[in-house]
Image (cartoon, rainbow, N blue to C red):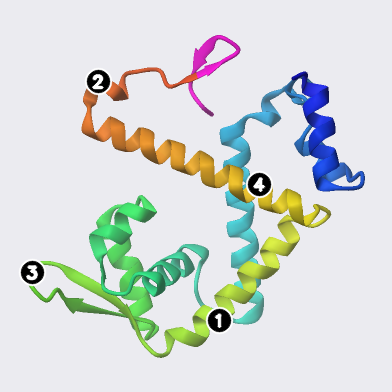
Amino acid sequence: MAANDASDLVRLAVGPRNPAAEKMIEPPEAQSGLDRNFGFLVHDVSRLIKRRFDRRARQTGLPITRRQAAVILYIARNEGVSQSEVASWLDMEPIALVRMLDKLHEEGLVERRAHKTDRRIRTLWLTPAARPVIERIQIINQAIREEAFAGLPAQARDTVINILDGIKDNLVLQEEAADSSPAAAATPLVTVNGQVGILE
């Protein structure tokens, strides 16, 4: 199928003409240039979301950063999780996470407990005081999502989320394969128009 034909099909799926949505489905040759680099674009979106969160948190008097909020939400979904698991999920050095947890503990939001069977492991739990903070975090997150997807139809929002989920799953599989087989880490994984390269 030609690129223009694909674009027409997506336009029919997402509804009436919308410049922001149409930019998402332009053929690659119409969007060439360094500003279209996938890795930089994802990084920029993440950076701006963090900046918007930190700004809104300051404006509403919420005394935590975006990364601290991410830790709180992760613990809320996985109470009793170990410190090492949180550090791995955030891709943080353990000592940096310890400092962050110290701050959250001082704020009365997180408590550490010894593991039931392994005293060397510290597990993380939320305090009752964290519950209203989670509600405020979720309100800020929802507002930022509305800002990020402004001008895009609901179908396009769902498409973006599904695509990012698929990209994440693909990369997780590649990381797991690389961890289990050193040879896999040296194998080129990305081919675009017959050219092998690095996904950025």
| Residue 113 spot, x, y in % from top left | 19, 79
Q: Name the image quarter holding residue 136.
A: bottom right
Residue ID at (66%, 47%): 160
Q: Position of residue 144 (x, y in %)?
A: 68, 64
Q: Residue at x 22, y 33 (%)?
A: 180
- Mark found first going from the N terminus, 4 or 3: 3
Q: Amino acid at mark 2?
A: Ala
Give the class, few, some or many, for how many residues have Cα within 10 Å of label 3's Cα (few <14, many ≥20). few
Q: State the residue position of label 4.
A: 160
Question: Mark 4 or 1 closer to N-term?
Answer: 1
- Which residue is at the far top? 194
Report which quarter residue 123 is drawn in.
bottom left
- 2 or 1: tag closer to the N-terminus: 1
Dot 3 lies on which element?
loop
Of the two numbered discs 3 and 1 on the same chain, state the one appearing first in sequence: 3
Report the Cα–Cα distance between label 2 and label 4. Answer: 33 Å
How many marks are shown on the rendered structure?
A: 4
Question: In x, y percent, where is residue 108?
Answer: 37, 86
Q: Residue under circle 2?
A: 183
Q: Is residue 19 covered in magenta?
A: no
Q: CA distance from mark 4 to mark 3?
A: 42 Å
Q: Which residue was labeled with disc 3?
A: 118
Query: x, y percentage for residue 117?
Result: 7, 72
Where are the magenta residues, as a range? 191-200
- The residue that disc 1 covers is 135
Q: Which is more toward the observer, 107 or 190?
A: 190
Q: Is residue 180 left or right of residue 188?
A: left
Q: Earlier in the sequence, mark 2 or mark 4?
A: 4
Work out how far the residue at label 3 is from the one at label 2, CA to CA, in angstroms: 34 Å
